[in-house]
Image (cartoon, rainbow, N blue to C red):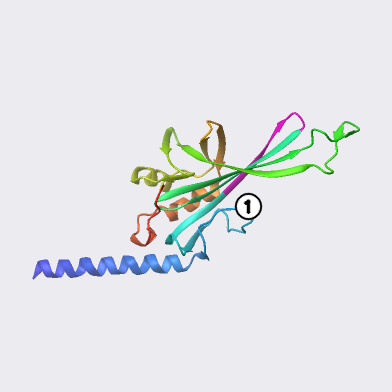
């Protein structure tokens, strides 16, 4: 009799936890695709419920950071987009160059007229994440990286503030960036160990 009562209580506890998880998920903003892209208008740096027709339903957070570089008369804007989900993290690294090498100078400044712009997406194969004094190094394919249980725990308990990351492209180029503190705060929701946080269809890294 005691065992039966304990089993019933355990089942009730699981059902209650699942109900809470589902209720919490419905309180989040809904996004209909897990795709990244410069043409998309996404809710950045907040936990969202993602309902993707190919990857299933899961909780995640989109992050974006950009910065500028300069080489001769060329200004380069590097944009790092990422999607953090319970099972994986995906990146999109886009470089926008404005080539003004052949433009005339006016009072020491180059003209932006007729400058050419182009986007160049790069494949990322190595990811390093620094949390406190620990550095997690992850290998991936097609700019997608698996999230181990150890890494998920570290992300879920990361202290407030920005987190430094390092990306290595297929060609060997190294790019340092940051994950903003609002996304770091959202990690607490994304990586809370709940059954309903896991995608119904696991991502396949190919």
At which x and y percent is residue 106?
90, 34
Main SS of residues in magenta: strand
Q: Residue shown at 29%/69% (left/top)?
A: 15
Q: Residue shown at 50%/60% (left/top)?
A: 48
Specify the quadrant of the image occupied by residue 197: bottom left
Specify the quadrant of the image occupied by residue 179: top right
Q: Residue shown at 41%/36% (left/top)?
A: 136
Q: Quadrant of the N terminus?
A: bottom left
At which x and y percent is residue 115?
80, 42
Above or below for 134 versus 14: above
The magenta span reads 64-73
Q: Residue shown at 32%/65% (left/top)?
A: 17
Q: Is residue 19 left or right of residue 112?
A: left
Above or below for 178 versus 188: above
| Front position in the image: 9 or 143 | 143
Given the current orientation, which residue lies at the most extreme top position?
72
User: Which residue is disc 1 drawn over?
Assistant: 38
Given the current orientation, which residue lies at the most extreme right position?
107
**Total label count?**
1
Q: Is residue 77 left or right of residue 139?
A: right
Residue 67 within the magenta-colored segment of the rendering: yes
Residue 175 within the magenta-colored segment of the rendering: no
At which x and y percent is residue 116?
76, 42
At which x and y percent is residue 186?
49, 53
Regarding mark 1 in the picture, which secondary structure is present there? loop
Given the current orientation, which residue lies at the most extreme left position?
1
Q: Residues within 10 Å of mark 1 (few under 14, many from 20)?
A: few
| Front position in the image: 80 or 131 | 80
């Amino acid at each position: 009799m005691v065992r039966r009562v304990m089993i019933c209580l355990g089942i009730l506890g699981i059902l209650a936890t699942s109900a809470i998880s589902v209720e919490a998920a419905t309180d989040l903003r809904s996004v209909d695709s897990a795709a990244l892209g410069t043409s998309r208008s996404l809710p950045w740096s907040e936990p969202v419920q993602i309902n993707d027709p190919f990857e299933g339903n899961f909780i995640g957070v989109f992050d974006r950071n950009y910065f500028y570089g300069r080489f001769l008369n060329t200004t380069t804007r590097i944009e790092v987009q990422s999607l953090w989900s319970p099972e994986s993290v995906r990146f999109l690294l886009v470089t926008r160059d404005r080539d003004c090498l052949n433009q005339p100078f006016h009072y020491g400044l180059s003209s932006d007229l007729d400058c050419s712009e182009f986007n160049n997406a790069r494949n990322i194969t190595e990811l390093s994440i620094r949390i406190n004094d620990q550095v997690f190094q992850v290998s991936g394919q097609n700019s997608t990286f698996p999230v181990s249980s150890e890494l998920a725990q570290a992300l879920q308990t990361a202290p407030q503030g920005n987190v430094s990351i390092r990306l290595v492209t297929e060609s060997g180029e190294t790019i340092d960036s940051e994950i903003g503190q609002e996304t770091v705060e959202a990690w607490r929701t994304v990586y809370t160990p709940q059954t309903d946080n896991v995608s119904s269809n696991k991502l396949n890294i190919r």
